């Protein structure tokens, strides 16, 4: 997806992401646009990360916790378990 | 740790081929030696790690297979629970210190991830091959199939992350596949709990975004 990540790009992305999440929600887009004006690829990565700032963990937990129900075709109640896994994983 | 990870992967890939002869001690545990191997590994004996990996892999695999085969209507597999189960079954906890536990969990996290990914790949291959007719398309698009794809997308994204920030990929592995706390992860990788939290937060957002962007 997009431009390959390099060490330097990752460090910049991480710094911008953390700085953006410190801001009030209505200030984030403006900040992100200003800081990445010279780099559309970075702008898109940062926007994507901000969009998943609160649900990334739940998505990971869902991907991992859903494996058992992937074995038999019938799947029930995974969201409850995923939510529980997610909440226990984010208790820090 | 990087070397350990490399070895862990190699052992996971070799999997069944490198089965260590498993004995039983008086307690009926599959291998009482795991306890001693952990102590020797912590003391810097890398040969102990080589012996340890196939035993832990095989036990985890066995526990995971049992879960994955069992039809459980109201439960889904929680890797952290399986790692706990392996810990309880393999190790005499009273003889070990906290550091040994963390090492065991770090090793088990890598293996758990590999086992689940291999399982997901097998499921995906099964659906592509074997003359699965188009009429089963609905079933393939079921929640289960989607989650198989999600896990493979996560694995791929974690590989990408590991190339630029190995520690962050490891933090995710330890938190999600072994269930270590932020404090335990911090002690294991040698940074503060606050750093672990911050790195986890960034990694989660990036992984969530990257998993969404992958079409398959």
Image (cartoon, coloured by chain):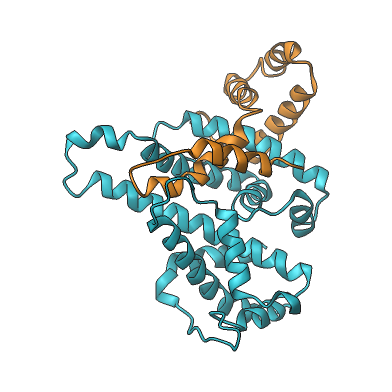
Q: Residue at x 45, y 58 (%)?
A: B67
Reply above or below: B121 against B20: above
Q: Residue at x 76, y 56 (%)?
A: B184
- The image quarter in which residue B108 lies: bottom right
In the image, the chain rendered in cyan is B
The x, y position of residue B207, in whole percent, is: 58, 36
Tell me the quarter of the image containing the N terminus of chain B: bottom right
- The image quarter in which residue A81 lies: top right
The x, y position of residue B173, in whole percent, is: 61, 51
**Would residue B61 be found to the left or right of residue A12 on screen?**
left
Q: Residue at x 60, y 33 (%)?
A: A56
Residue nearest the viewer, comparing A51 with B73: B73
- The image quarter in which residue A23 lies: top right
Residue nearest the viewer, comparing A4 with B111: B111
In the image, the chain rendered in orange is A
The x, y position of residue A73, in whole percent, is: 33, 43
Q: Residue at x 65, y 17 (%)?
A: A38
**Would residue A43 be found to the left or right of residue B76 on screen?**
right
**Would residue B85 be found to the left or right of residue B136 on screen?**
right
Tell me the quarter of the image containing the C terminus of chain B: top left
The x, y position of residue B77, in whole percent, is: 50, 51
Residue nearest the viewer, comparing B70 with A60: B70
Reply above or below: B138 against B109: above
Reply above or below: B120 against A4: below
Residue nearest the viewer, comparing B63 with B147: B63
């Amino acid at each position: 997806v997009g431009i390959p990540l390099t060490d330097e790009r990752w460090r910049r992305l991480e710094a911008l992401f953390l700085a953006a999440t410190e801001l009030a929600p209505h200030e984030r887009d403006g900040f992100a646009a200003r800081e990445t004006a010279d780099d559309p690829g970075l702008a898109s990565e940062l926007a994507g990360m901000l969009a998943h700032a609160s649900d990334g963990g739940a998505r990971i937990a869902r991907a991992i916790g859903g494996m058992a129900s992937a074995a038999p075709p019938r799947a029930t109640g995974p969201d409850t378990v995923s939510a529980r896994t997610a909440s226990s994983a984010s208790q820090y | 740790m990087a070397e350990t990870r490399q070895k862990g992967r190699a052992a996971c890939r070799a999997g069944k081929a490198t089965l260590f002869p498993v004995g039983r001690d008086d307690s009926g545990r599959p291998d009482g030696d795991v306890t001693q191997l952990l102590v020797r590994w912590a003391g810097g004996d890398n040969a102990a790690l080589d012996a340890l990996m196939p035993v832990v892999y095989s036990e985890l695999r066995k526990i995971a297979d049992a879960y994955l085969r069992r039809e459980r209507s109201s439960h889904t597999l929680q890797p952290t629970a399986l790692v706990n189960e392996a810990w309880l079954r393999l190790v005499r906890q009273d003889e070990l210190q906290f550091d040994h536990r963390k090492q065991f969990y770090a090793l088990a996290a890598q293996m758990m991830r590999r086992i689940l990914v291999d399982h997901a790949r097998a499921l995906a291959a099964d659906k592509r091959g074997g003359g699965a007719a188009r009429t089963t398309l609905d079933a393939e698009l079921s929640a289960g199939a989607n989650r198989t794809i999600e896990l493979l997308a996560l694995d791929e994204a974690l590989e990408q992350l590991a190339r630029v920030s190995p520690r962050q990929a490891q933090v995710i592995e330890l938190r999600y596949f072994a269930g270590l706390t932020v404090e335990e992860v911090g002690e294991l990788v040698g940074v503060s709990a606050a750093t672990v939290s911050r790195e986890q937060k960034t990694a989660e957002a990036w992984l969530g975004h990257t998993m969404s962007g992958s079409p398959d």
